[in-house]
Image (tube, helix red, strand yellow):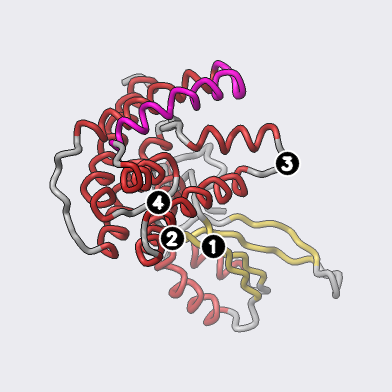
Amino acid sequence: MSKKFKNFLLLNVGAFIAAFGFNAFFVHNNIVTGGIGGLAISFHQIFGWDSANFMLIVNIPLLLLCYFGLGKQTFIKTIYGSWVYPLLIKLTQNVPTMTKSPLLAAIFGGLVVGFGLGIIFWSDSSTGGTGILVQLLGKYTPISLGQGVVLIDGLVTLIGFLAFDSDTVLYSIIGLVVISYIINAIQTGFTTLTTVLIVSKRHHQIKHYINTVADRGVTEIPVKGGYSGKNHVMLITTVAGYEFAKLQEAIEKIDETAFITVMPTSQVKGRGFSLQKNHAQIEDDILIPM
């Protein structure tokens, strides 16, 4: 399967999931989670406009801005997603509302929509919409992309206050947080990972434990003490979050004076994680345990 076809397939699957979540959870519970979708829900309440039609129409001037402001390549990558998402929202308008509780709608709708959007972004695609405005702000103003997202979604939220009561908008913010978390988790991985830096006079024993008992790779780096000026060896290893407590306990048993630095890690690729874990069979792998 070619990468282009795979991305095309993921884009359509993600758009369908996001569209289903939008109609099944957000629309009838008035959950305004930013973007064109949130704006569409607010304007449906204020003016009675059809949400899907509004999104389709608004995308026309936004795509023109994308073409002239961001270039042909970005336009090509954006145009299909910006149309298929509203069309699928239109096709799924009659799905039953899964809950009438705004809180449950915000949480579970955020999970479903966030999962769908995460798949879309994973396919290196976009649904256009206010994301185009954010990119334009980032390109032509000193405003960063992160600040642009806050600014644009903030404006959409303010419009939500015009259409709905404050409780509804606060539920919407919960939904936006859930969506952001799920998208980020899909991009970086759901597994909690921890990178551990260890400086110890008994580094050979600790290294042996990591290689044989913990069954993880480890890297040795020569370091020099800033105060003593003495040469030491620092060990670096990455383990799953649930493995860290046992590793820490073992290190303290070997050397209770060991200096341990722990860093949360969002993503790891390579031997033992995204590749097979049998280190011994891969002679040319730089991540073989020392």
Who comes first in sequence, dot 4 or dot 2? 4
The type of residue carrying mark 2 is Thr
Who comes first in sequence, dot 4 or dot 1? 4
Q: Mark 2 = which residue?
A: 192
**Mark 2 Cα-neighbour bin, 10 Å: few <14, some 14–19, many ≥20:** some
Residue 43 location (% of width, % of height): 37, 43
Q: Mark 4 = which residue?
A: 33
Q: Is residue 130 a member of the stretch shown in magenta?
A: no
Who comes first in sequence, dot 3 or dot 2? 3
Who comes first in sequence, dot 2 or dot 1? 2
Range shown magenta:
50-72
Q: Mark 1 = which residue?
A: 264
Q: Nearer the viewer, residue 157 or 186?
A: 157
Q: Mark 4 touching mark 2, by CB under 8 A?
A: no
Q: Nearer the viewer, residue 31 or 248?
A: 31
Who comes first in sequence, dot 3 or dot 1? 3
**Mark 3 Cα-neighbour bin, 10 Å: few <14, some 14–19, many ≥20:** few
